[in-house]
């Protein structure tokens, strides 16, 4: 059996005339958390939809929990999905949610469902449409855990959540991962959630994977450079990623192995995850400048 | 087990865990045979990545402080006397270095220092005899 929670290998998928996933490859070993980071429109949701077999691909291959995608229907049992909208009917009460979903899952665990709702502070008599964003997310997590999913996939789970609810979500993910056979993928543009809990990161921009690996490897791969407004002009072989020039300072992200070429009079520091995300996601006009 | 991580500290998180658990073992707060939480439980409790806790435990194991049991957890190994001695020697060295730095600022010479040290040793000896 494969030791990967999932893998995308050379995936191409045309979305519109102007946007497509191009040669997208990344994978997650079982038992860990991966953050998929990119600006709005970078291709995070498309990549997730391809992974889950919700969208056809034009090339490449996808593996999910040891099966090719599209794969056996039973695979659905093993994956819990939290999208940025709810698929549940607004007028359902939470007790009805269970009755509606239970027939679709072989291993539905009603005691666990009610136990989780209780733990999450959700009332069985509440209606889906009356739940706050944070409560709705907890409901979908409760559903996923009740059918014993081994992989949880969240699309932008933290957007629209207040800091307390985000922290609670991080705790729920930690509980889920106590089982080494469980894995989590979540997409986000809020990098602070991932600073600490993320094991692996994948940076996506404009439908392409910019970099993927362990969080430490990604942080080590880049340096942030700050210099005067007229500096960083006559260098050869250094790519300035997302360079921003103002009348007082020039700031850019560079690959660590190129940072040595920058000379002594510039400030070179390890970047935060947020700085990496900002520079990689910068608009095309100033994203790259090879000087 | 007590682990308190600082966000602002220069040391990476795995290093902070390693240092604190190592210190607790050396001081006897964590006795031989004590069970440590699994890397996953520790990651959950500290809200950090599993890779980070795994690395901290791996280094503690490599230095002979703990043994890890795959899928279960980890426990404290009997203190290796050579290891303890090594740690104690380092502590003595650090203390003497601090004293030296202060002595230099105060303008003390070698003879003054040796005299002071002899005095301290004699006082400690006297204390021991009395008790």
Image: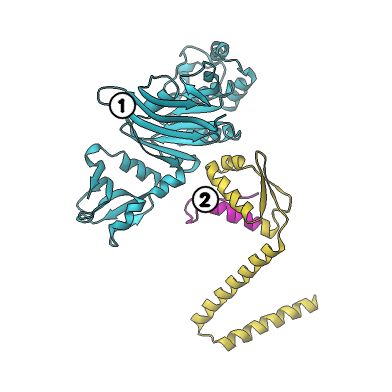
Chain colours: A cyan, B yellow
Q: Quadrant of residue A86?
A: top left
Label 1 environment density (alpha carbons within 10 Å; few <14, some 14–19, many ≥20): some
Q: Position of residue A165 (x, y in %)?
A: 49, 33
Q: Secondary structure at mark 1?
A: strand
Q: Is residue A37 left or right of residue A240?
A: right
Q: Residue at x 47, y 53 (%)?
A: B8
Q: Which residues are magenta?
A: B1-24
Q: Secondary structure at mark 2?
A: helix
Q: Magenta includes A276? A: no
Q: Quadrant of residue A215?
A: top left
Looking at the figure, which quarter contains the N terminus of chain A?
top right
Q: Residue at x 46, y 28 (%)?
A: A154
Q: Position of residue B121 (x, y in %)?
A: 69, 80
Q: Quadrant of residue B117?
A: bottom right
Label 2 environment density (alpha carbons within 10 Å; few <14, some 14–19, many ≥20): many
Task: Give the residue pinned by disc 1.
Answer: A20
Q: Position of residue A5 (x, y in %)?
A: 52, 30
Nearer to us in this view, A14 or A115: A14
Q: Residue at x 23, y 56 (%)?
A: A228
Total count of labels: 2
Nearer to us in this view, A126 or A68: A68
Q: Identify the disc placed on residue B13.
A: 2
């Amino acid at each position: 059996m494969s030791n990967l929670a999932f893998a995308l290998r050379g995936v191409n998928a045309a979305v519109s005339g102007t946007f497509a996933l191009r040669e997208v490859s990344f994978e997650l070993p079982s038992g860990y958390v991966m953050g998929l980071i990119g600006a709005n429109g970078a291709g995070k949701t498309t990549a997730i939809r391809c992974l889950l077999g919700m969208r056809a691909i034009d090339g490449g291959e996808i593996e999910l929990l040891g099966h090719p995608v599209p794969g056996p229907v039973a695979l659905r049992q093993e994956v819990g999905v939290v999208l940025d909208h709810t698929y549940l009917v607004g007028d359902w009460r939470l007790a009805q949610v269970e009755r509606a979903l239970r027939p679709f899952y072989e291993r539905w665990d009603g005691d666990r469902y009610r136990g989780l709702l209780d733990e999450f502070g959700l009332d069985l008599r509440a209606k889906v449409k009356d739940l706050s964003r944070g409560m709705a997310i907890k409901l979908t997590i409760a559903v996923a855990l009740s059918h014993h999913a081994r992989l949880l996939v969240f699309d932008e789970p933290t957007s629209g959540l207040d800091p307390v609810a985000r922290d609670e979500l991080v705790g729920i993910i930690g509980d889920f991962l106590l089982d080494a056979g469980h894995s989590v993928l979540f997409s986000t543009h809020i990098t602070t959630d991932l600073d600490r809990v993320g094991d692996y990161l994948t940076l996506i921009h404009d439908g392409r994977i910019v970099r993927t690996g362990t969080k430490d490897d990604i942080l080590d791969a880049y340096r942030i450079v700050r210099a005067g407004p007229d500096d960083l002009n006559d260098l050869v072989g250094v790519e300035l990623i997302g360079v921003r020039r103002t009348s007082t300072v020039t700031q850019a992200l560079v690959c660590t192995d190129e940072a040595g070429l920058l000379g002594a009079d510039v400030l070179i520091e390890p970047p935060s995850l947020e700085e990496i995300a900002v520079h990689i996601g910068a608009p095309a006009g100033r994203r790259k400048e090879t000087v | 087990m007590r682990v308190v991580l600082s966000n602002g500290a220069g040391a990476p998180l795995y290093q902070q865990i390693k240092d604190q658990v190592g210190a607790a073992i050396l001081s006897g707060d964590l006795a031989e045979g004590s069970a440590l939480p699994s890397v996953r439980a520790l990651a959950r409790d500290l809200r950090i990545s599993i890779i980070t806790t795994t690395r901290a435990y791996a280094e503690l194991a490599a230095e002979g402080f703990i043994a890890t049991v795959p899928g279960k957890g980890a426990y404290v190994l009997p203190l290796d006397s050579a290891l303890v001695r090594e740690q104690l020697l380092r502590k003595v060295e650090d203390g003497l270095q601090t004293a030296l730095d202060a002595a230099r600022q105060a303008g003390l010479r070698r003879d003054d220092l040796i005299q002071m040290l002899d005095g301290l040793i004699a006082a400690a000896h006297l204390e021991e005899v009395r008790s």
